Image (tube, helix red, strand yellow):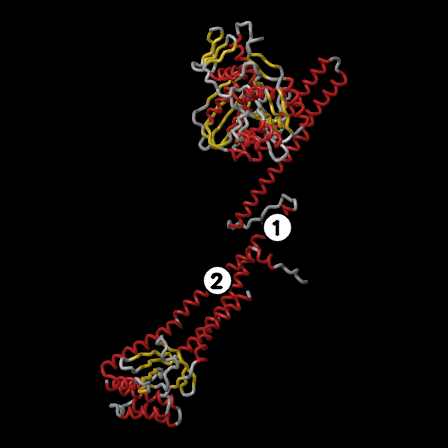
Amino acid sequence: MRILLVEDDVEVARFVRKGLQEAGHTVEHAPNGRDGLFMAASEPFDLLVLDRMLPGGVDGVRLVETLRGQGNKTPVLFLTAMTAVDERVRGLKAGGDDYMTKPFAFAELLARVEALGRRPAVDAPATRLRVADLELDLLSRTVTRAGKKVEVQPREFRLLEHLMRHAGQVVTRTMLLEKVWDYHFDPQTNVIDVHVSRLRQKLDKGFDRPLIHTVRNAGYMIRAEP
Amino acid sequence: MRLILSLLALMSTAPFDLAGATTAQAEVVRVTTDSAAYCGELSQRLSVTPHAEAEPARSLAEEGRRLCDNGYVRTGVAKLRRALRAAMNQAN
Amino acid sequence: MALPPRPVRRVLGSASLRFALLFAVLFLGAGLAFAAVLWWGTAGALDRQTDAAIRADATAMQERWRAGGPAALVDAIETRLAADVENEMLYLLLSADREPLAGNLDDPPPQQDSDIPWFRVPLLRDDEPSEARLYRLDLGDGSRLFVGRDVAEKLRLRTLLTDALAWSATAATLFAGLGAWLLSRALSQRLAPATSTAVAIAAGDLAPRVPLTGREDEFDRLGQTMNAMLDRIATLMSGVRGVSDAIAHDLRTPIARARSKLEEALGSASDEVALRGAIEQGIADLDGITRIFQAVLRIAEVEAGARRAAFAPFDMTPVLEDAADLYLPSAESQGAVLEADIPPNLMLTGDRDLVLQAVANLLDNAVKFTPEGGTIRLVARRGARAVYIEVSDDGPGLSAEDRERAGTRFFRADSARTTPGSGLGLSLVRAVAALHRGDLRLADAHPGDPRPGLLATLRLPA
């Protein structure tokens, strides 16, 4: 993916850039909002990673508003040191697609970057998701593995749907909490882990090959290969 | 505060000025009935009026004539007029 | 001692003075209007009366002329003059060639041919100055009659009236000034406590409050509002102080712990695996610190009440169902049961995310402290004016004195020292409750039992 990183903190920029490059992405860096806006408007990118507060008169929110005003629909991930809850809402309202607070774990950032970047431009009206021998029917809301029906709760169905839509990508606990439960806070205990392990038990029980994998220090991933 | 006071003073004097303004410019008109001649005229009128000898017209007329003769013309005229009126009232 | 000169602008800038001036102007304006009406009703009426009498007289004379010709008119004039006891009637009949025929004036008024037939001329009667009001009547044969009245008497009355009005105007001005001064003084006096309080606050002392007179008037309301504002500011200030205290005392400990662990690993780790493990532990510690930090800031944000702007009506029922759904597997994985009893349509006005987080924190606590085989209950009830959300568990519960302290930042009961947590969960719940003008009450879930459990009741006014 070709990613534009607009971040004024040299140290954070270096760290994010290095990490993303190691994950196989091309990263351009702009140190302020004006340069960032210029680059984003003149070159094609798959994703913008923006600091919320930027020097140079153009901050993250204004940058996105300007781009969206020009009809540019490149996905945007906000990074911010502001913790106020309303900040997230404001960032998303301005046209951002996702939002992360500093400090963050790089694994979380990478997972979100990949989830955003690979998002299909137009949601294909798929009625059936498939990973290896696991099938999820969105119309009848049933799950089968190797042709055998697996009974899941509605919430587990949505959890599995989200994992399968991002098959091959890491999905973090916070992302699951946000996307499946629409919660925007950090629960103190491992509630998500318990949900995933229940789902995993239902799906992988009696099969040699597990499909839901735990990615250490990051989250979960569903994929066919072990 | 001083301004308001002076404004008020001006306002309150205005009517005097208006009254005075007309007096100053015009030529004076005289009243001819405040004269000894008119005293005589009234006396004569009284003498041809019926009931002029009845009281109180008679004594009023007498007093009027006396005042006129002594130079109090205006008071005299007033008395004579009253005498005339009294006489005329008597007639009615 | 000479007072320092006050700049005019500052004097005019004083609101109490402006009010006082407004009062004075209104007062004088009312006085003037009153005087005008009085004038019109008295002096004006006298004038109008005179004019009416003259007009009536003139009309009668004209009738006489029409009926009997000049001779009858002369006779009428002389009869009238002869009976004029008040000595105020004035007549002058001029022939067509302007020779006087009858009447008691020696000359016509100087501008006798003016368009308007009304004249006001100075009069000399027996060498005493007076004033006449005359009306000109042109008779058909070219002769001309002036009918009038001596208005000296009326002028005298008018002068008296003017004098009286002037005196009362002076008195009114004095009263207006006095009233304005009293008003201005009363205003400044009533505002003085608020001003002096504000000055003291501005100087840095947050303690003083505006003294109230108990009269419940506008000034008292201003004072009350100011006091409420000051109380709120004081609360916020102590909140900020609380956050900095919390950061100073309670973040220092985990930071020191993480730092010493890393330092130890740097000095004594035998191989790369051990070093890696130590660094991972360090990152985990830092994440924990960040989490605490965010929780503290979140509590401060909620306590500051800034989020009340985002209040909107929403249905609590799905929110509570979500919360139960989220924590059900956690409870079950501990061998506990989570029972939910949630009625439909629990409408509430508030911040959905925060209420959800408060309930989640309560459930989090309950799950943490419930032993195997225990029961966690999430019950919602609709009261007369509020929604009650109860979370009860079978855990060790809290002693009465711990209950008092629960909800202050970083409080952790001795019995909870070994379980993970920051001690901020209940603080946030309390803050969210307060933001919604509700409260959090803690009680024993099973009173008398050796393991009384904890019953947390969150009351949120609907």
Task: Report which residue position mark 2 lands on.
Answer: C27
Q: Residues within 10 Å of mark 2 (few under 14, many from 20)?
A: some
Picture coordinates of residue C344, whole percent (x, y)? 43, 25
Compared across the picture, whether C237 is left or right of C220 comes to right
Q: Percent from the top left, x then y, of residue C194?
A: 58, 49
Q: In screen coordinates, is C169 left or right of A20? A: left
Q: Sequence-wise, which precedes: disc 1 or disc 2?
A: 2
Q: Residue C39 or C16: which is nearer the viewer?
A: C39
Task: Give the vertical position of C326 relative to C180 (above or below).
Answer: above
| Residue C16 in sight in this render | yes
Say which element carries label 2: helix
Q: Please state which amino acid type lies under the numbered disc 1.
A: Ser
On the image, numbered disc 1 is attached to which residue?
A: C196
> Is the residue C403 above or below the residue C27 in the image?
above
Q: Chain of mark 1?
A: C
Task: Identify the residue at image location x=59%, y=58%.
Answer: C11
Q: Percent from the top left, x then y, of residue C451?
A: 57, 20
In the picture shown, does residue C352 fall above or below C231? above
Q: Residue furthest left?
A: C67
Quadrant of image for the N terminus of chain C = bottom right
**Camera-nearest residue between A62 and A222:** A62
Depth order, front residue of C6/A126 = A126
Q: Say if residue C369 shows up in the picture.
A: no
Q: In the image, what residue occupies the spot 59% across and 51% down?
A: C193
